[in-house]
Amino acid sequence: MRLVCGPRQFALPDVDDAMRVILYGQAQAEGQGSTGEAARHKILLRRFQCEPRAWDLLSIALSAVTADFAALRAQSPDGWTREFDLDIAVADAPFWTGHAESLAKALAFLTTDRWTLRFHDGGVQPALPKDPVRPKEDCVVLLSGGLDSLVGAIDLAAAGNRSFAISQTVRGDADKQVDFAARIGGGLGHLQLNHNASLPGLQEASQRTRSFIFVAFGVLAATALHRYYVGDRVPLYVCENGFIALNPPLTGGRLGSLSTRTTHPEFLGRLQRVLDAADLRVGMVNPYETKTKGEMLRECADQPLLKAIAVQSTSCGRFQRFNYRQCGRCVPCQVRRAAFIAWGGIPDATDYVYERIGRRDADHSGFDDVRSVAVALAAVRDEGAESWFSPALASPFVRDRAALLGMLNRGIAELQSLHKSYGVT
């Protein structure tokens, strides 16, 4: 699928077969898409002065997330893998052209699709604000409304860091993002953004590019900080437990489509190389890449605060599908429930749609994700963790294989406790 993405005035000859996507504006004709206008408006309203290449990175991420919506996986030859051909308007086309292959490989790893990226002059570069606001915070943290990002923001505040929180607004989580930011560290600087991609026709629901746009928002905000302005490198904290970050395939059938890679070391590592090449002084950090979710909860530096608000967080991969209730049976829900057991801090009072995952029916223990975890538990018991998890660790961006293997063992043990407590067989 080919998309041409740029501001309203951007045009390319001989692309009648492509979908036109208006960046930072509204669609002007039938069949066009649009994305990014509201995010740009909110950033400019704050009078943030951001790096030109950070704006370019956001343009690239907006184009990718719109493409992700535009092509239905079910219509691809294998029912999953799609081919994208993107022409994107940026301010520094020669630089991005030199790194198009690196970005395409990062996106291919993230989404398991094939990407071709071409860059053209004519991208959006907002005028510099007359009186720029340069926030005094010393780092940026992604605050999604999930449990891991909540723990990460709490720990940063407890360690004396002054974090600026960036949230990607998701229906059902917006209010809790605001509440969490207000309750952590006496109140965090906070900005909620959304890509607001709009397209004609049906839209793909899998959305593997959501982490790319979230990181791009974070990078843009990091370059607006005073710390960045004076020449320092700004940490961008992407907080996720190591088990979900690696997301090892639980069965042979989950090697591609069912194993997300939103915070995998390889995706973050490939993207970091691009940031470094762009001279964007922003360093992505996941402090919990060798921690299980249960360990994150147990070791959180502000236990009273975490106990007060942990249950309000969202972990479910199907949250919107169940009318903003957590299903209790998907893999992220099972990891969450296992973590509460391992924590022992408070009873898990989350309102799960499917509470009794030990029930032998298609909605509970017979559901695919519950069966997949059960299969993985049996395989690790019979074959050992080393052989079972090796594919998840086969990446040049994995730095400490032994530490990650130990974490995966402990994560499996947490899931084992969950299944045992509910009698899943």
Image (tube, rainbow, N blue to C red):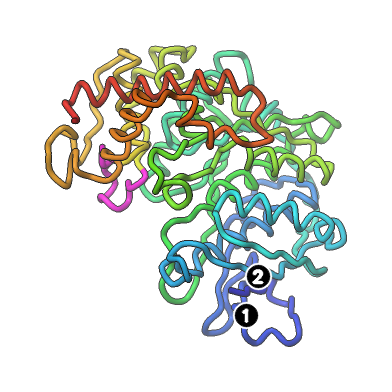
- Determine the main secondary structure of the stretch shown in magenta: loop
| Residue highlighted by disc 1 | 18
Q: Amino acid at mark 2?
A: Asp
The mark nearer the N terminus, 1 or 2, is 1
Residue at the spot of label 2? 85
**Looking at the image, which residue is at 50% across and 18% down?**
406
Is residue 40 placed above or below 338 in the rendered structure?
A: below
Q: Amino acid at mark 1?
A: Ala
State the CA–CA distance, disc 1 to disc 2: 9 Å
Relative image position of residue 103 (x, y in whole percent): 71, 53
Q: Position of residue 229 (x, y in %)?
A: 82, 35
Apparent side of residue 200 relative to residue 142 in the rendered image (left or right): left
Q: Provide the residue span drawn in magenta.
A: 317-329
**Residue 336 vs residue 406: left or right?**
left
Q: Residues within 10 Å of mark 2 (few under 14, many from 20)?
A: some
| Quadrant of residue 425 within the rendered picture | top left
In the figure, 308 relative to 4: above or below?
above
Q: Is 314 or 26 nearer to us in this picture?
A: 314
Which dot marks residue 155? none
Q: Residue at x 18, y 26 (%)?
A: 422
Crowd rating for badge 1 (residues with CA inside 10 Å; few <14, some 14–19, many 20+): some
